[in-house]
Amino acid sequence: MYWNAKLERLDPEALQELQLTRLREIMARAAASPFYGRRLQEAGLTAADLRSLDDFRRLPLTTKDELRAHGKEMLTRPLTDMVRLHASSGTTGQATVIYYTRADIEAWADLVARSLYMAGMRADDVFQNMMGYGLFTGGLGFHYGAERLGALTIPIGAGNSQRQLQLMQQFGTTAVHIIPSYALYLLNTFAQHGLAPRSLSLRLAFLGAEPHSEDMRRRIEAAYGVRAYNSYGLSEMNGPGVAFECPEQNGMHVWEDSFLMEVLDPVTLEPVAPGETGELVFTNLTRQGMPLLRYRTRDLASYDLAPCACGRRFKRLSRIKGRSDDMVIIKGVNIFPMQIDKVLMAMPEVGTHYLVELSRVDFNDQMLVKVEVQQSFFQEDLKYLKQLQKRITEALKSELLVTPRVELVEPNALPRSEGKAQRVIDKRS
Ligand code: COA
Ligand code: AMP
Ligand code: ZN
């Protein structure tokens, strides 16, 4: 039942003691990096004089902008000691990059293995990973964890729906890692091929990368004949394997031996009480190469302290309830409106106004970008406009990693709003 019984069964007092010890270690390690060296000094904090978790709160939060601008200054060791990086989408200089040492990759794999084991996956399972490989952490993160656990791992990645079905049939897939909206969308492909998902060997589904409701989980469970578990993580804290559901399905246990979690009011930045919604702030407790201290995730959620029937005392995180910034998630890909702005405003043909509409058709996320074209270009022939439309689509896809539908409109065709223009309308429920 436990991958690491000693750690997973720690009681709150022992856990707090372990966290304090690890916090001192990580502060000492982080102090070797130029960024945190400065920051700790400015806050007048040293590992030696840290008496309680409250002391640690004197350290200012680390933001995504700081990570973008100073990421490399957060390394505690030379770049030659790093063996991998993962990055968010975005133009050079805007992407957030996380570097991992070999030990970091191993610790991460162990956390994912622990999560999968908790949810019931075993070495004799056949695991099909339907998340994006490459720079996304959902691919390789789960991959290494599943291998560590000993499961036969199929690294198919995202997309390619028909092939997903073939592999499930051919190799008797028992467990999948899948984006929840795609799991529901994929049911169409099953129907087109006259195949019943329940007739396959599937028994477990791990759902992550985007917010989803209890209703969606239940639908996936019913359609596929599986038990489905919520999986939360973010690249800045390795990737998946930060919080994961146990068989009780009553919130995601946060792996507090590896991550210190704070839940703060996004305005006052004061801690909120259990059950209240706040912004998640995490500190790596064990990372070697690039530990982040008090990282502001912008994810909103609440937590529960009550003991769980599974025997673990780690806090349980609610579903992610939203964001305290303007990031949106489309097909499991994180997108900041600023990225769209940058692409469009760099094109001389584009006017000053555009509008992004997000919708979900048949559980498939759609992104429609209506773009006002400058008068002089709008008068060009249809062939020219078609080419322009194609160029804009490609430029956006290259920046965002999802393909939008682009519609060119006349100057002044889009509604003007008073005050700050609302550029993104999310029509998904
Ligand atoms: N997950 C997996 N596959 C998806 C998907 C999703 N959320 N949404 C769509 N797809 C499938 C489509 O069904 C299609 O396959 P098919 O034609 O064989 O049915 C294929 O991906 C391409 O779809 P399209 O809508 O044309 O793709 P796009 O260019 O807009 O986006 C994706 C391409 C889906 C591959 C890209 O958005 C992606 O990699 N998403 C997954 C991100 C991820 O893994 N996030 C986890 C982060 S930890
Ligand atoms: P990335 O850094 O690409 O791994 O994306 C991390 C972000 O994806 C998080 O900050 C969340 O906003 C979102 N996310 C990841 N897992 C979940 C989940 N289970 N539920 C809701 N949102 C999630
Ligand atoms: Zn539990």
Image (cartoon, rainbow, N blue to C red):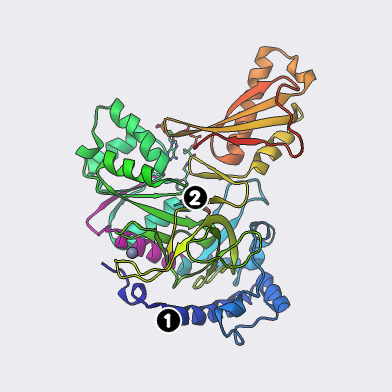
The residue range painted magenta reads 105-130
On the image, the x and y values in percent for residue 279 come to 57, 59
Q: Is residue 35 magenta?
A: no
Q: Is residue 106 magenta?
A: yes
Q: For the view shown, which residue lies furthest in the top direction?
A: 381
Question: Which is nearer the N-term, disc 2 or disc 1?
Answer: 1
Q: Nearer the viewer, residue 247 or 331?
A: 247
Q: Nearer the viewer, residue 173 or 428?
A: 428
* Circles 2 and 1 in contact, beta carbons < 8 Å: no
Left or right, 374 with reference to 32: right
Q: For the view shown, which residue lies furthest in the right direction?
A: 376
On the image, the x and y values in percent for residue 219 come to 32, 40
Q: Which residue is mark 1?
A: 13
Residue at image location 29% in from the left, 66% down from the top: 309
Left or right, 248 with reference to 340: left
38 to 177, vertically: above or below: below
On the image, the x and y values in percent for residue 238 come to 49, 61
Q: Does residue 213 show up?
A: yes
Left or right, 363 with reference to 39: left
Disc 2 crowd, CA 10 A, few/some/many (<14, 14-19, 20+) = some
Q: Secondary structure at mark 2?
A: loop
